[in-house]
Amino acid sequence: MSIFHRAMDRFADFIWTGRKVNLRFTAEYRTACYAVPLINKLLAEGDDGDAYRTALVPWHEAERPPLAIYQGGTSRCRIDGPWQMARCDWLPLGGLILSPSVTAHLDPFEAQALHDKMQQAIETVILAWVRDHDLTALPPVPEHFDRRRADRKAKAMIAAWASGEGASATSIITPGDGVDCCSGYTADLPCDACRKGPAHD
């Protein structure tokens, strides 16, 4: 993005901050039925809306629609779509690897091979977690849960950990609540501008 465009973006942000705008879309009916709930989530005010918009920043930056994005501590890879039918199989159009001092574009076959390896690695880690935490011994719980209650407990855990009461934090959520009781997860936090959307550098 040029210096001029960045300056105009910042000026527009200053002018329009706090103002509401009306958006109008035209879409095929079935597409609209699927897209409208997603749009509503993206436009939501507060932390939820910020989180949804931040999650889509890599989509906005990609030239092709991402089929999968795998993020590590300092490296990440992206599998690019749309899927292409080849004989009796489906292949991505390509992929991208970003790592310190490395930027590599992948052809369809390299991208598919990497995609398979990443899925295998994830499956291995998940199964190991299930085994190490003896999750199969716990009674099954619904996939959906009481969001308000779960958020309240999660925030209480985080607050206890932040105040140095780590031992008490692990006892706040008990098995059967349908919420993971793990701590120590860290991730790069987005800046305030990223939380509002990707239109900045």
Image (spheres, rainbow, N blue to C red):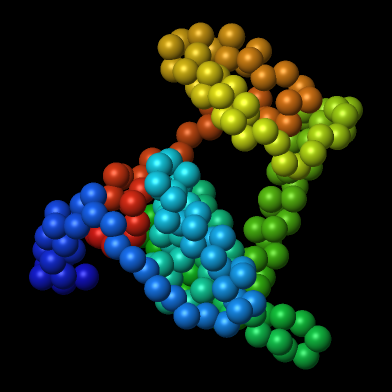
- Residue at figure coordinates x 46%, y 56% from the top left: 42
Vertical order, 174 against 8 (above or below): above
Residue 106 placement (x, y as % from top left): 52, 75
Vertical order, 181 against 60 (above or below): above
Vertical order, 123 against 30 (above or below): above
Residue 104 placement (x, y as % from top left): 45, 70
Residue 169 lies in quadrant: top right
Residue 4 lies in quadrant: bottom left
Q: How many marks?
A: 0
- Residue at figure coordinates x 46%, y 66% from the top left: 59
Can residue 75 be seen in the rendering of this structure? no
In the displayed structure image, the side of residue 47 where residue 132 appears, left or right: right
- Residue at figure coordinates x 21%, y 52% from the top left: 17
Residue 36 placement (x, y as % from top left): 54, 65
- Residue at figure coordinates x 57%, y 73% from the top left: 32
Front residue (pair 187, 9)? 9
In the displayed structure image, the side of residue 170 where residue 120 appears, left or right: right
Front residue (pair 100, 48)? 48
In the displayed structure image, the side of residue 153 where residue 162 appears, left or right: left
**Image quadrant containing the N terminus:** bottom left
Vertical order, 53 against 139 (above or below): below
Residue 66 placement (x, y as % from top left): 53, 69
Front residue (pair 121, 135)? 135
Residue, far bottom: 87
**Image quadrant containing the C terminus:** bottom left
Can residue 28 be seen in the rendering of this structure? yes
